[in-house]
Amino acid sequence: MKIKGKFLAVVCCLALLAPAGLAGDAEDALIDKIVAAYGGDALLEVKTLRINDRSKGFRYGQSFSPNEIDLAHYNALVTVDFENRRKALQWVRGSQPNISLQHQIFDGTQGYSIDHTARTLTENSGITYSSADRRVSWLLDTVLARMIADERADAVYQGEENYDGAAHRKISFQADGFPRMTLYIESESGRISKMQRSHWVEGQYFNYQFSGYKRQDGITYAASTYVTRGGQPFEVVTARAVKFNPEVTAVFDLPVGYGEEKPTIDFSKMTVNKLADGVYLAGQNWGFSIFVDAGDYFIASGGYRGLKDRLEAVNAFAGVDKRLKFQVVSHHHNDHLGGMKEAAELGAVFVTVKEHVNAIRESAGVTLADDKFVIVDGSGSVAGGKLMVVDFPTGHTSHLLVSYIPSAKIAFTADTFFSRQEAGVPSGSERLSAFKKMFADHKLDVDYFAAAHSGRVLTPAELDAAINNIPEDEVCPADWKFCMK
């Protein structure tokens, strides 16, 4: 009887601690409230959904100048087939005539990339139900309400919080293929006020804030979404149109008569290639570095995350144990600064332009003395000329350091000239003519081009071919009515 009495006492205490209305099964009760707020059976019975969002994005870490934040315009049409777990994205960045298109489909089994300018249709295993829409559907609170209803078994109640001046209850869940999301539910209405998910930078978060709720076909949705990343403005929806249960059969029809894109190289595993005596190209996925043996140490260029792994792989490949003394920083974009913390931990000196010093310090996350920087003004060299650098401003960034290894006649670039295809000529751009001229102006004789985004090494003949292989400007396909407005 004593045991039973203690058990009852604990139960009573737990009941008192539980939020009002959530005693017993907090998760189910809160999810039921969310579902009711978003339309009840009308929400749960939605088979298909179409979202047309126009938005503006703030390009932190990807802007032309490190001192300003660029603004990008997006127009996206997303079709979701909940019943068959299919998803399609038609996506436009910019405004005509300067636009960039992306069209991808996940048909429930296979992902496809469609290039309407090149008229190619390519199977893409990286396109899945969760990734096919470039996260656009996450901007709609109604989708999140449907997701947590479908994933209630994984949901975890996270307690109460006063958010935006009102009482909220928090609940988190993780659907297959998606990151864990935490929803802030207004206690009174049951609507989602905010969704939070982690950023790849530890301690930072994306916060999706919803407002301007509307009712259509018995279903609730927010007309506006504002996203912050690490506390800074990231994206804002400026116009939104939603359609519930549209006919979607034609959306998932694959184009007829399109060829297949040339096969790409698999860079999923770490690779090291010796390009010349004492010169190594190492990397995997989208991050590669070139390493130059300078005797007692290495010089590196290519600053993606995983720098330590690449250095370790090169040391193992060459059968040496040498430190990294100099790290060339190509430019200020955050993906190419991803390895700066590792470079700092390795004790490297940063070779850069003065305009990028603050961005490097911020990315490194540690105090870096002035003597940890070699500042380049136009051009320069390190280690007695074993590696040279030239500042090559482009439309991509205001400063871009190109590395050149005189002994091997090898140039290493970031975001300029590369190909991930197994063979064939890469597509060119107008800036490649200026790129070629830059080497001639500095009297640098190049036999090979390596790059930060690929393990494939290219030649001057391929550069000439790329200059003569500039694709036509992209235009919206005739049936993309949403981007004709």
Image (cartoon, rainbow, N blue to C red):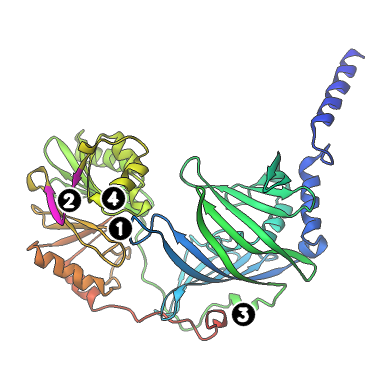
User: Please, what is the three-letter code of the amino acid marked with disc 1?
Assistant: Ser
Tell me if residue 379 is in the magenta stretch. yes
- First reached walking from the N terminus: tag 4 or tag 1: 4
Determine the secondary structure under disc 1: strand
- First reached walking from the N terminus: tag 1 or tag 3: 3
Task: Assess disc 4: are there few (<14), some (14-19) or many (≥20) residues with their C-alpha within 10 Å of its C-alpha.
Answer: many
For image coordinates 77% across by 60% down, the residue present is 38
For image coordinates 55% across by 84% down, the residue present is 479
Tell me if residue 404 is in the magenta stretch. no
User: Which span of residues is magenta-colored?
Assistant: 374-381
Q: Is residue 261 shown left or right of residue 90?
A: left
Task: Assess disc 3: are there few (<14), some (14-19) or many (≥20) residues with their C-alpha within 10 Å of its C-alpha.
Answer: few
Label 3: which residue? 250
Of labels 1 and 2, the one closer to you: 2
Q: CA distance from mark 2 to mark 4?
A: 11 Å
For image coordinates 16% across by 61% down, the residue present is 448
Q: Name the image quarter holding the C terminus.
A: bottom right
Determine the secondary structure under disc 2: loop
- Say the numbered circle drawn on residue 454: 1
